[in-house]
Amino acid sequence: MKNLIVIAGAPGSGKSTLASSLKEKLDSTWIDYGKFREFHLDRDWKKANDKEEQLAFENLLLVVKNYLKHGYKNVIVDDLRDFRIQQIPKEFKEGDYIIISLVLDDVELEKRITTRNDGWKNVPDAQAWNNALKDRAILSNEYKIDTTHKTPEETLKEVLRLLEN
């Protein structure tokens, strides 16, 4: 098992569902970065600026590193933008983390976005985010999982297998 589990993906890819399932299955801590940002920004990010976002990310790193320092295992972090995901290998030791990037096809992503009850509803932005993630080179300790035709349970099983290695 890894000490830090980072879940990446566009809105609608299944990040929150996976994080919630992992938290329950592993009896672990889950930090939703979206909630973390709300300490500094409004829910819609209308007042967002680079300085406040940087402050929120630095605070997240401090909190995660403090959990790890105190012996917590399987700390789950989700809802990071991809440029932040790309910083994880610089911030944590090679064997201490795993990045699970959830991707899917545009048709399925649009279906999920338009039928969800809450959360991000901008389909073109979500598709651009998803496609950029699919096209980006794989990072150290990163695994990309296509969730297009997978149930949440199937995705969870695949991730648990990766965590066992």
Image (spheres, rainbow, N blue to C red):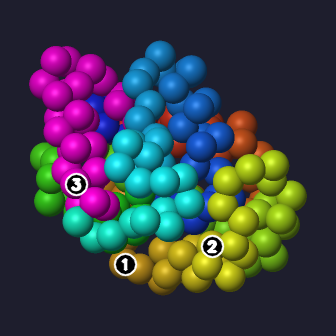
- Choose between 137 and 23: the one closer to the eye: 23
**Residue for badge 2:** 126
Q: Residue at x 57, y 65 (%)?
A: 10
Tell me residue 63's x, y (percent).
23, 34
Residue 126 in view of the camera: yes
| Rendered image quadrant of residue 66 | top left
Q: Nearer the viewer, residue 82 or 44?
A: 44
Say which residue label 3 marks: 55
Packing grade of label 1 (10 A; few <14, some 14-19, many >=20) is: few
Which of discs 1 and 2 lies nearer the camera? The answer is 2
* Residue name at image x 61 percent, y 30 percent: 21
For the N terminus, give its image quadrant: top left
Q: Which residue is mark 1?
A: 137
Q: Is residue 164 visible?
A: no
Whichever of labels 2 and 3 marks the residue nearer the N terminus, that label is 3
Of mark 1 and mark 3, the one earlier in the sequence is: 3
Q: CA distance from mark 1 to mark 3?
A: 27 Å
What is the magenta range?
52-78
Residue 87's quadrant in the figure? bottom left
- The reply to whether the magenta stretch includes residue 56 is yes
Q: Residues within 10 Å of mark 3 (few under 14, many from 20)?
A: few
Depicted 3 relative to depicted 91: above or below: above
Q: Nearer the viewer's eye, disc 1 or disc 3?
A: 3
Amino acid type of the residue tagged 2 in the rendering: Ala
Left or right: 131, with 71 as reference point: right
